Image (tube, rainbow, N blue to C red):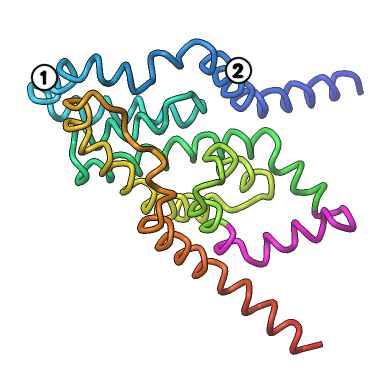
Amino acid sequence: MAEMMANTNKSTLRKKLPFLVILTAALIGASTLRDYLSFEALRDNREALIAFRDANYLVAVLGFIAIYIVIVAFSLPGAAIATLTGGFLFATFPGFLFNITAATIGATAIFSAARMGFGDKLAAKMENSEGMVKTIKDGIDENQWSVLFLIRLVPAVPFFVANLVPALVDVPLRRFVISTFFGIIPGSVVYTSVGAGLGEVFARGETPNLGIIFEPHILLPILGLCALALLPIIIKAVRGKEGL
């Protein structure tokens, strides 16, 4: 019996280890890498980055994507700066494609680690629970596509949270990947385009306006997409009331 329990504990630890490594890296990175993954660092190294890109374009693309994946997967500070860098180095197109590809892969890594360590067990507990917790779980299960797109489209939802919540309610990997890739396109295009204009910002000695996504001409179309994501939920709710 003791040996069986020991094996079970080892198996549980192995499942949780990837997420614990990510969490540890995130905590260390938050205190040690902030100065290296910043707008100032991009500004000070812009000429070297452009020279390297011009001399080694394919290597620059692959290296950029790899670094972006690590930033997202380990929830390191600097994801917004990485998106700007993608636009600065590679223009809005194909820069935004590099950005959403890297962000999706990184998000999938942390999603998989969280689900492996905690998702299945937590989802089972929520499924067997009663009251409000079970209601929330059922609501997400019945409207997974809508909820997944919604948390990607709403600018106020932190990317880290949008990666973890689906893992903890047992969202299928395929749905997570698809909703992440397409759901982050609007925000990614906006920030990548801001990055594409950084040359002029640097020349004026200014900093980019990262709050541009909350300006009406940007925010209103995104809110329109949020409304479309909510539409199936609203229709289900209305039909449910009509059936009462």
Residue farthest along the left direction in this orientation:
55
Q: Look at label 2 and name its amino acid.
A: Thr
Could you give the CA–CA distance between mark 1 and mark 2, rounded to whole angstroms? 34 Å
State which mark lies toward you, 1 or 2.
Answer: 1
In the figure, residue 106 lies in which quadrant? top left
The residue lying at 31 percent from left, 16 percent from top is 41
Label 1 secondary element? helix
Amino acid under disc 1: Ala
Pointer 1 local density, CA inside 10 Å: few below 14, some 14–19, many at least 20: few
Q: Is residue 192 above or below residue 177?
A: above
Q: Which residue is mark 1?
A: 51
Query: Which mark is on residue 68?
Result: none
| Residue 46 screen position, x and y as percent | 20, 20
**Span colored in magenta:** 127-147
Q: Is residue 29 left or right of residue 37?
A: right
Residue placed at 79% from the left, 26% from the top?
8
Please give the label number shown on residue 24.
Answer: 2
Q: Residue at x 55, y 40 (%)?
A: 158
76 or 109: nearer the eye?
Answer: 76
Report helix, strand or loop for mark 2. Answer: helix
Residue 125 in percent (x, y) is at 82, 47
Provide residue 122's location: percent of width, then percent of height.
76, 43
The N terminus, quarter of image: top right
Q: Quadrant of the C terminus?
A: bottom right
Instruction: Assign the magenta stretch its main secondary structure.
Output: helix
Q: Does 128 lie within the magenta span? A: yes
Look at 25% across and 44% down and name the residue there. Answer: 193
Q: Residues within 10 Å of mark 2 (few under 14, many from 20)?
A: few
First of labels 1, 2 by sequence position: 2
